[in-house]
Amino acid sequence: MTANGRLRTAAVVTAWIAVLLALSLWSVRKDPPTVAEQRDIGQAVPELRRATGALIAAADDERWVLRLGELRIEDCSITPVRSGRAASRDLTVIVPEGDARTALEAVAAGLPPGYHAAVTAVRGGTRLSFYADAGEFIAIDAAALSADQIVTVRVDSGCRPSGGTADVADPPAGPVPAALTATLTALGADAAVTPRTRAVACPDGGTAATFVADAGSHDAEDGPVGVPDGTVPVWADAGGWAYRMGSASVVVTAQGGRLQVSVTTTCGQ
């Protein structure tokens, strides 16, 4: 083949590759989803909310303390050349020392049977892994040591196409719980402050919510303050403390010498 022939062949091949790439990009943008993994982030968020409601209902137990995290929407990569968005939300479960496995197993048992939730323990039971499939490609997972007192359980959509509108507004959280007012008053903070809220709908109706407020400066190393008489904190160290006040979960954390209070009401309240 002559030099000119090789150049013509190379040009044809290059043009054909360009056509295929253009068709591929057009298909990604225009074709309707053909598999569940292609459902966009706008479709994923309601399913993530449903799974979070089921999770917090399953985790409610007077033996430990709960705190609902914020809904996060973050950029991610579906492929090296295709970006997307991922939704996730954490539920923090604070347990007495040595109860991490018991708590995760109770959560697994409390989730709907269709989630097929399970806890796996390895390395002599010292490393715990939790996983559940909430359907619609929503995963619930956690990893912890058996000695951990603060266990984070995450609900995750995985990386989805960014099309559609993701509604990030939580449902109304309801009235401010008395436990928040009482805790802020005991800490010498303004009990009339309007708290920040995080909320999800419960499977059987109602709402579970976490109310968050700043409580001013305090040295957490001085020990828990405002804990009701006769109540033993579930967790307490230099980073803060947590306890149950009736059916409400109270968490006080210290950051930079300042305290933050969160009170969580669950589906049974």
Image (cartoon, rainbow, N blue to C red):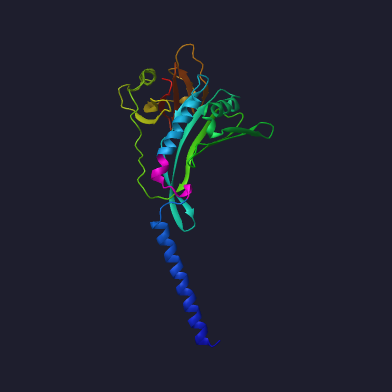
Q: Residue at coordinates 42% horizontally, 59% vertically from top-left?
A: 27
Q: Position of residue 72 (x, y in %)?
A: 42, 40
Q: Is residue 62 above or below residue 26?
A: above
**Observer-nearest of 138 and 197:** 138
Q: Position of residue 160 (x, y in %)?
A: 45, 48
Examine the residues drawn in magenta and state their main secondary structure. helix
Does the stretch in magenta take in 36?
yes
Quarter placement of the N terminus: bottom right
> Which quarter of the figure has residue 88?
top left
> Which quarter of the figure has residue 26?
bottom left
**Observer-nearest of 17 and 236:** 17
Q: Is residue 240 above or below residue 245?
A: below
Q: Is residue 15 above or below residue 200?
A: below
Q: Position of residue 167 (x, y in %)?
A: 35, 40
Which residue in the rendered view is the most extreme toward the bottom? 2
Q: Position of residue 228 (x, y in %)?
A: 44, 14
Which residue in the rendered view is the most extreme toward the top? 230
Q: Residue at coordinates 48% horizontally, 52% vertically from top-left?
A: 78
**Observer-nearest of 203 and 96:** 203
Query: Magenta segment range?
Result: 35-45
> Which quarter of the figure has residue 251?
top left
Q: Residue at coordinates 38% horizontally, 57% vertically from top-left?
A: 30
Q: Residue at coordinates 38% horizontally, 21% vertically from top-left?
A: 180
Does the stretch in magenta take in 250?
no
**Observer-nearest of 254 and 102:** 102
Quarter placement of the C terminus: top left
